[in-house]
Amino acid sequence: MRRKRSDELPRYVNEPDAPPFQWRRRYLYYIVFAYLFIYWLRAPKRTTSDSDSVNWSSYAYSLYATDSATLCHAVLVFDALARLGSKADRVLFYPKYWDTVVADARDRDSQLLVMARDTYKVKLQPISLLTVEGRTTATPIALPRAYWSLSKPWPLTSLLMVIQPNLDEFARFKKTITGGGNEALVNAHKFDMELINERFEDNAMVLPHRPYALLSGEFRSHNHSAYLGSTSKDWDAERVYSEAKLVHFSDWPLPKPWIMWPQEGLAEMQPDCGGRHDAAPCAERRIWKHLYDDFRLRRKDICRLLSVPAPDWANIKGGEHSANVTEGTGHEAPHAEGQVEGSGKDDEQTPVHDA
């Protein structure tokens, strides 16, 4: 549409009579502006965000450690919470026979306890361990379901638990554990996940597994309908990774990330990129390897612990999820030079990459 030129616009020529009206209108503008300004000054202001108004001392991230490996894992979580600006308290439960007296430069457990307390402001809580066949206690709870389970309804998973402290529930579980547990339960080798399901499967609040419970093995899978919740949704590895709040390492029979990969196992188990064999790895393989590399580097830099040497692939490979030499967290790991306060530059054994 053609714009009109300035000389084509209508002109008002009765200018001598205009000023009185214009001044009165201007005064009206001033009055309205002054009223709005006063109202703005007197109006209540929100000086704090909803997050700032929360009493964060009523909330806490609570972790427990029973050996050197799980202690390091807990410190890595506290480090991540600190980097992300978490305001909730941090609590670490650990065996009461541990101490915070650093005996020497290789006393990693005491060093890590001191680091947790002083660097990450963790409240240390020594406790007597109450275990039967590896079980732990639980209380009224909210947690996600194990979407990877073959049975339905999917069981609850102890991968992540939001707990409302309850002394009655604690006493009930303590009695079960100290009493040795039900004989059938012990013989069935049931652990914390099974105990929690038997107690809370009908009354727990269920958290969405997406984004609160993602398995690393999801990036090796070809069928993502269970995680996505539908066969019609498109899988986007980058988006899933960026949305995930917590990733649990699970790539059986490959060992956990504190144990190095056997080269044959890596070649066989890494994401296959849809059968592609070109030089550039797909997003799934790149993300999957980054998860492991990042864990190992942070374990070395923060905990000053190197990875446990890789086992023989032939000894751990198998279709059934039966126990093997990589089970548990009690493996003796070589130490990096220096104490945990530093971020030393010592080289760990060379990580295994694409095979």
Image (cartoon, grey):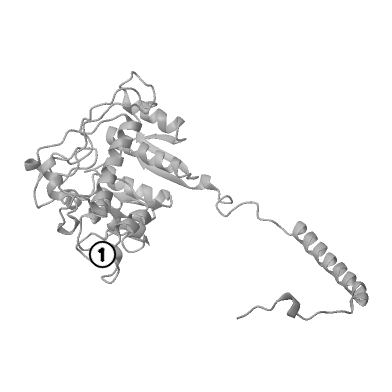
Q: Position of residue 156 (x, y in %)?
A: 29, 58
User: Please, what secondary structure does the residue beneath circle 1 have?
Assistant: helix
Q: Quadrant of the N terminus?
A: bottom right
Q: Is residue 274 left or right of residue 45?
A: left
Q: Position of residue 160 (x, y in %)?
A: 34, 51
Q: Is residue 94 left or right of residue 52?
A: left
| Label 1 packing within 10 angstroms: few (<14), some (14-19), many (20+) | few
| Res. 194 visible in picture | no
Q: Is residue 13 above or below residue 199?
A: below
Disc 1 residue type? Ala
Determine the residue positioned at 45% across, 35% down: 120
In this view, which residue lies farthest toward the top? 104
Q: Quadrant of the C terminus?
A: top left
Which of the two residues, 250 or 201, is positioned nearer the viewer here?
250
Where does label 1 land, which residue? 226
Which of the two residues, 152 or 296, is positioned nearer the viewer here?
296
- Answer with the quarter of the image where residue 203 lies: bottom left
Q: Position of residue 324 (x, y in %)?
A: 12, 42
Q: Position of residue 38 (x, y in %)?
A: 80, 60
